[in-house]
Amino acid sequence: MNVRDIDTAIAQVLEAYRSAVHAKDVAALMRLYDPDVRVFDMWGVWSYEGAEAWQSAVEGWFTSLGMERVKVIFDDVRTIPGDECAAVSAIVTYAGISAEGEELRAMQNRLSWVFRTSGGIPRIVHEHTSAPVGFDDMKAILQRGSGV
């Protein structure tokens, strides 16, 4: 794929991710991931090995939301294109939205995705989310520009 095609495909993945999370659509979200995905999530588990393990985590996340939805906003998206693999890094805001549409809370993560392209379709083969940790209190800093 050329650079323009990769950028278009990645933009489509970002939109599909936003839509799937907002809809709490596990199947739609999991279509973005390779069966052999490795996920370094920042919550509670060191890593998820394979789509089945990651799907269980996603199902738990969506179930925990109850009637709430999550609005996803990608900022400072940077793409590194390649023929068979590509990478993306971004700052992602996850905002909890009430059933009435009110923003209840928000947090930000640093996100890196590595894609493998097969048949012209990029799939996430590695996801890494993180947040810096404050030196003084050892707590995750969940808002960009906060802390040190």
Image (cartoon, helix red, strand yellow):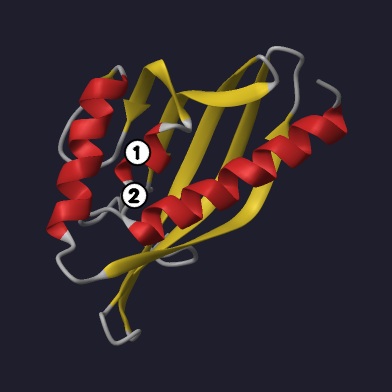
Q: Please, is residue 141 above or below residue 115 in the view? A: below
Q: Say whether residue 68 is left or right of residue 124.
A: left
Residue bearing mark 2: 25
Q: Say whether residue 107 is left or right of residue 73.
A: left
Question: For the C terminus, which image quadrant?
Answer: bottom left
Q: Position of residue 21 (x, y in %)?
A: 38, 54
| Viewer-side residue, 29 vs 2 | 29
Q: Please, is residue 103 above or below residue 107 in the view? A: below
Task: Give amino acid for label 1.
Answer: Ala
Callout 2 secondary element: loop
- Residue 27's label in the rendered image is 1
Is residue 56 in sight in this rendering? yes
Q: Say whether residue 61 is left or right of residue 127.
A: left
Q: Mark 1: give few (<14), some (14-19) or many (20+) Cα within 10 Å.
A: few
Callout 1 secondary element: helix
| Viewer-side residue, 65 vs 40 | 65
**Identity of the residue drawn at 67% across and 14% down:** 119
Question: For the N terminus, which image quadrant?
Answer: top right
Q: Mark 2: give few (<14), some (14-19) or many (20+) Cα within 10 Å.
A: some
Q: Position of residue 107 (x, y in %)?
A: 35, 64
For the residues bearing labels 2 and 1, Cβ distance under 8 angstroms: yes
**Identity of the residue drawn at 14% across and 65% down:** 66
Q: Please, is residue 111 above or below residue 144 in the view? A: above
Q: Quadrant of residue 126?
A: top left
Q: How many angstroms separate mark 2 from mark 1 (CA)?
A: 6 Å
Q: Position of residue 37 (x, y in %)?
A: 39, 19
